[in-house]
Image (cartoon, grey):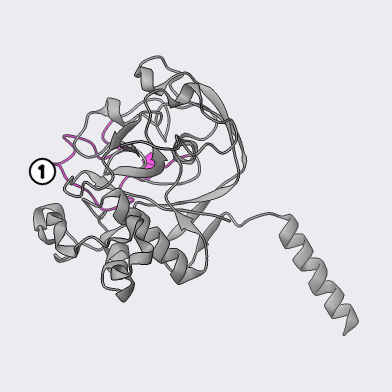
Amino acid sequence: MRRLIAISFAAATLLSAAGPEKTVNDGFGDFLLVPAGAFKMGDNFGDGLPRERPVHTVELDAFYIGKTEITNGQWRKFRDDPGYDDPKFWPGGRPFPKDQVPYWTQANNHGGATADSDDYPVLGVNWDSAVAYCNWLSAKTGKKYRLPTEAEWEKAARGTDQRKYPWGNTIDRTFANYVGSAKFDTGMKVGSFAKGASPYGALDMGGNVMEWCSDWYSRDYYSTSAKKNPKGPATGAYRVVRGGSFFVEAFDLRAYGRTAGWPSYQAHRMTGFRAAREP
C-alpha cells in the first residue's frame, strides 16, 4: 500500500511539474494554453496607425484563450439561465434586456433564435454583456473566466514571431471572413477557416466578428504601457476592440490593429467576443 501511495504521489508531482494542460474544457468550449513569456507588441511592419506604435516588449503570465468566438449556442446557455438577471454578474449591477439585441431573431444574420444557428458567433453583444457572461461562467465552473487583456489578445493572435496576421504575413479569403467573402456580409460558423488558425490554434482571430478586450482604450497607451501583464489605462470612455470583422477590409484584420467601442453600445452587429481563462 505504501508503495502504491508513493507511486501515485510521484506521478502527481510529475504531472504538476509538466505545467498546465495544452487544452482545457469545463463544458463551455475548448480553451487553448498561451504559455508565459515575452513578446513584442505593436506595428513592426510600419503600415499601421500611430495608436499601434511604438513596438514594445511585454511579458505575460500563462493563460488560456477560447479556441473560438462565443457562439449563439454558448450564449443561449447564459441567456436562458436564471443567472442572466442576477445583478452581481453585470458591470454596474444592471442586466441588459434580452430583446435589446435585434440580430438574435434575424435569419440573415444567423441569430440565435433562428434555425441551425448554434455554431455561429453571437452578434451585437456589448462589453457589459460580455463581462457578465464571463462572470456567470466563472460562477458555473469554479474557474476564473474573463475577457482577455489587449496584450493577451495580441499574443494569442500572433504568437512571438511578430507576424502580421494570425496565420502569417499574407492574406486572401481562404484564411478569414472579411468583406466580400460572401454575398451577404455577416458572421460565418466559427472555425470555418482552419487555415487561419493562430500559432496556438485559436480560430477567427482575424475577421468574422470584432472582439472585446478588458482594457480601457487610450490612443497613446503603448508609450506608457507596463512591461509585465499590462491591463490598460486606469480609466477611459471606450474599451478596446480587436480582430476586424466580416464587414472590413484586409487592413483591419492585422493582428496588431486596434480600435475601440463604447462599452454599453449594444446595436453593433459586427461585435462579439472571445473569453480567456486563468490556469
Q: Position of residue 82 (x, y in %)?
A: 30, 75
Front residue of 264/47: it is 264
Q: Amino acid at mark 1?
A: Phe
- Image vertical order of residue 114 relative to residue 38, above or below: below
Does residue 109 lie above or below 162 as drawn?
below
Q: Which residue is painted at 19% across and 64% down in the image?
A: 98
Establish if 47 lies above or below 128: above
What crowding class fits label 1: few (fewer than 14 Cα within 10 Å), some (14-19), or many (20 or more)? Answer: few
Where residue 180 sits in the image (x, y, percent)?
A: 16, 34
Q: Please tell me how many numbered marks the rendered image carries.
A: 1
Q: Where residue 94 sits: x, y (%)?
A: 28, 60
Q: Quadrant of residue 242?
A: top left
| Vertical relation: 36 (above or below) 171 | below
Residue position marked by numbered label 1 in the rendering: 184
- Which element is circle 1 on? loop
187 part of magenta stretch: yes
Identify which residue is drawn at 40% across, 28% down.
256
Q: Quadrant of the C terminus?
A: bottom right
The residue located at (45%, 69%) in the rendering is: 139
Q: Which residues are magenta?
A: 172-198
Task: Quarter of the image for the N terminus: give it.
Answer: bottom right
Q: For residue 31: magenta?
A: no
Q: State whether the magenta stretch is mostly helix, strand or loop.
A: loop
**Residue 15 position by quadrant:** bottom right
- Most extreme residue toward the right, as rendered? 2
Q: Quadrant of residue 42?
A: top left
In this view, the residue in front, 166 or 44, is: 44
- The residue most toward the top is 46
With 116 as the anchor, is 28 left or right in this view?
right
* Left or right of 119 on screen, residue 64: right
Residue located at (33% from left, 49% from top)? 273
